[in-house]
Image: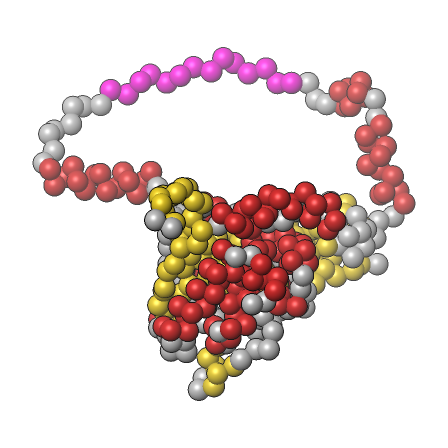
Amino acid sequence: MAVDIRIPPLGESITEATLVRWLKDDGAHVDADEVVLELETEKAAMEVQAETAGRLSIVVPAGSRVEPGSVVGRITEEAPAERAAPAAERAAPVESVAAARPAARVEAPHREPPARVEAPRPPTTPHDGDGRSVAASETDAEREPMSQLRRTIAARLVEAQRTAAILTTFNEVDLGELMTLRARHRERFRAKHGVDLGLMSLFARAVIHGLREVPILNARIDGTDIVKPRRVHLGIAVSTPRGLVVPVVRDADGQSLAALEKAIGDVARRAREGKLAPADLAGGTFTITNGGVFGSLLSTPILNPPQSGILGMHKIEDRPVAREGQVVIRPMMYVAVSYDHRLVDGEQAVTFLVRVKEALEDPARMVLEV
């Protein structure tokens, strides 16, 4: 009896994927629930597991484009003798295996052919040299096709630049009080909730605080309509070996700080492991991206269509600032919000960013919602 390996549903509006690679060879034994192949769609990487144990027959080779529901392989139930064979082979004495091998062939010593002597080359003109330099650089370059995910990232970034009127406004945040609060309660928070108190969840809470006052940044344009979601579905940009993906934490505005921390950690981990489902990447209403983890001091984040707003975090740096007539050293971060100016006015974007700044500089505001 054979069980078909079919391509699972890939998510809303996704009609095909690339079969990136088989993790088992044709004819190999696979166990039930073992991952046998990797897929890559325009939004994420996925893994497909074997439904049953048996011997794998590959129908569609790696690199092929496949559609949901298509059969790419089969798993055939093994006879008892087939299942026992590998164990028996592993138990065979070393002497019997060695005896079964043919004697090694003795070859004559290898002699290198005489070196070829080339005639001296005539001197080249600068033009000829430049031509050979280009050819050499092409020879030294490595060429490989872009992955489906990378092509999609490129297309979406160009689409965002072409279709939205993107504008960015900046501010700087003094994170001294927030970091003091985090250091003071971090161990107790971890002991009670079983999760670390990270900066991303605190920034997420500050963004939610700002969106409550300026909800237009949580909206989007759909044709000639403005769609205003009642909840905040927060996208968290995650860098992975395959490229940047933005999994979504749903109903982020209804979650506690600990629940936010767990949810953000979960989607980030699954993104890096390539275990996101297409549904994990759909439906976001606002995005946070953190270039600071790579050392970025300032940047202008690009919108994640069809969203109208994205907050960029950056590197925390001790800088001298003026406080009550005195120069003091404070942990400062530049923050940026890019927005679709077709929908969001400058006053609204600036107000949102100021509210985020106020919440981070006075964390009690997030708790008291004032």
* Helix, strand or loop: magenta stretch: loop
At a point 12% along the width and 41% down the height, the residue shown is: 127
**Which of the 4 quarters of the picture holds residue 151?**
bottom left
Return the residue nearer the eye: 136 or 279.
Answer: 279
Q: Is residue 99 above or below residue 277?
A: above
Q: Is residue 262 above or below residue 88?
A: below
- Specify whether 358 is left or right of 252: left
Q: Which residues are magenta?
A: 104-117
Q: Decide if residue 189 is in sight here.
A: yes
Q: Is residue 214 above or below residue 201?
A: below
Return the residue nearer the eye: 104 or 331.
Answer: 331
Residue 74 location (% of width, % of height): 74, 57
- Specify whether 335 is left or right of 284: left
**Which of the 4 quarters of the picture holds residue 303?**
bottom left
Is 152 in the magenta?
Answer: no
Return the residue nearer the eye: 213 or 237.
Answer: 213
At a point 72% along the width and 23% down the height, the residue shown is: 101
